[in-house]
Every structure is written in C-alpha cells, then in structure tokens.
Image (spheres, helix red, strand yellow):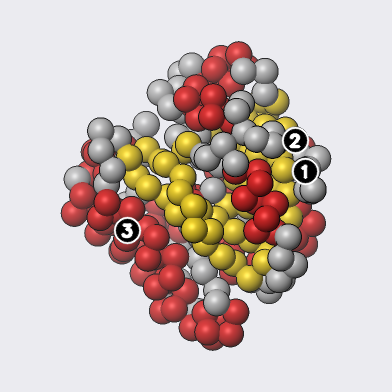
Amino acid sequence: MADVSIIIPTLNEGEYLARSLRYLTILTPPAKEIIVVDGGSTDATLAIAQSERFTVLCSQPGRAAQMNKGAQYATGDVLCFLHGDTLVPDDLIAVIEETLADSTVACGGFISLMTGKRVCWLTSLHNALKTYYAPLLFHPILFFQKGFRLLFGDQVMFCRRQDFWACGGFDAGQMIMEEADLCIRLSQLGRIIQVNRIVLSSDRRVAKWGVLKANFIYLAIGFLWGLGVSDATLKRFYEDVR
C-alpha cells in the first residue's frame, strides 16, 4: 500500500478551502499527510488551513513553485496535487493506489465537473475531451503509441514521488499550463491516464466570464500553448478571479 501526500497550493482560497479540507478529513483510507502551500494569501486562507491542523508552508507565489515546495517537504511515495476549490471522493487514496498499481502508469487524473449553483455540463465536457484532443493534435505519436493524455490542474493529478523528481518536477518558471508541461515529461516514464471517476471544482471562472467566453479562452489557450506561445503571453488572457 502506497503512502499518499496531498499537496494544495493556495492563494486567497478562503471562500472554498474549508469545505475542500473537510472532504480530506474523511478519506478512507486516509492520506499520509496533507500539505497546504500558500503563496501569500491576504484573506482567511492561512487561518483556515492552520485550524485544520494540516501542515502549512509559505512559498513565493506561483502554483508550480508552490507545488514543488510541497513535494520537497512530502514524505509519501505518491504525490497528489489538489486545488483549494476542488472536492474529492472519500475513496480518493484507494483509487490512486489502484491506478498506480499498474507499473506502466506514470501519472493519473480524474474527470472534473465544474459546479456552482449547478453543474456546467458544457465546460465539464470540454475539459474532459481536451484531455484527449490536445495530445492528439500536438503530440500524435505519443497519443497513438502510448495513449498519451494531457491533464490539467482541476483534474487532481497524482504520480509517484520518484517519477516526479526524475523528470524535474514542475517548471517553476511557468505561470500557466504547468500540469500539461509535466505530463509531457512524465510520459517518458509511463502512461498518462484519465481515471473514470469524478471530482468537483468551482465554476467561478465560468460564472464570471460566461460559458461561451470561458470555453473560448480555454480552447484558445490550449491551442496557442500547443503552438509554442509563451506562458507569459497566455497568462494575460487568464485573469485571476479570486
């Protein structure tokens, strides 16, 4: 049985974090440790994380750098990266262990449903399909040879700690698409798969932008990133909604 370290990068997640952390307290089996890595929150995020008695670290801002710091501190055999606004099933650890029991799998992630007052079905479907069509378009050889998938932050990525560091961890210089970038490097060590299970993520971007604008931005960023446009340029179109 693998020990799983859950790493949560946060920045002003006070509105959502308490609920997400409560879900983590009822995991069966439990995670080995839960590490919150904060990037300079000015709201109640730190107080909420500390009240749950989880490990809380402070880091320079930037999700990639924050997740790397959590991974450096982690002691589990497996690393699971979770956004502060995402809710996971109570058998999360069992699903991760079962998936990585297959030695050909280097990394996995879930199907993310975007939810708020209701489920955003169009956006959720697009995000699930993007896991398939993005690698098909931009990495067709890997797609057909290894069934390569590209995973994104809301999908709760997980991988073995030794594989994470073997490929260099997240690129701390990236401001966006850091999970997809990691998938490309992890694909040299094994398959990247999307598990047929659901996690729930906040639809706050969709609620602010509207369904059509949100999906256009997601689509455009994916295509431009695949064509090699710098993440600094892409980040300008992906405004912070917190």
User: Which sits earlier in the primary sequence, circle 1 or circle 3?
Assistant: 1
203 sits to left or right of 102 = left
User: Which sits earlier in the primary sequence, circle 1 or circle 2?
Assistant: 1
The vertical placement of 9 against 134, above or below, is above
- Tell me, for residue 33, which label it has, or none: none
**The quadrant where residue 232 appears:** bottom left
**What residue is pinned by disc 2?**
32
> Label 1 is placed on what type of residue?
Asp
Res. 69 visible in picture = no
Mark 2 and mark 3 in contact? Answer it, CB < 8 Å. no
Mark 1 and mark 2 in contact? Answer it, CB < 8 Å. yes
Residue 88: x, y in percent? 51, 39
The vertical placement of 224 against 198, above or below, is below
- Identified at 32% across, 58% down, the residue is 125
Res. 7 visible in picture = yes
**What residue is pinned by disc 3?**
125
- Tell me, for residue 3, which label it has, or none: 1
Dot 1 surroundings within 10 Å: few (below 14), some, or many (20 or more)?
some
Residue 21: x, y in percent? 55, 27
Mark 1 and mark 3 in contact? Answer it, CB < 8 Å. no
Q: What's the CA distance linking mark 2 and mark 3?
A: 32 Å
Instruction: Give the SS element for disc 2.
Output: loop
Instruction: Give the SS element for disc 3.
Output: helix
Q: What's the CA distance linking mark 1 and mark 3?
A: 32 Å
Residue 3: x, y in percent? 77, 43
> Label 3 is placed on what type of residue?
Leu
Q: Nearer the viewer, residue 48 or 175?
A: 48
**The quadrant where residue 174 appears:** bottom right
- Identified at 79% across, 56% down, the residue is 162
Residue 19: x, y in percent? 47, 25
> Label 2 is placed on what type of residue?
Lys
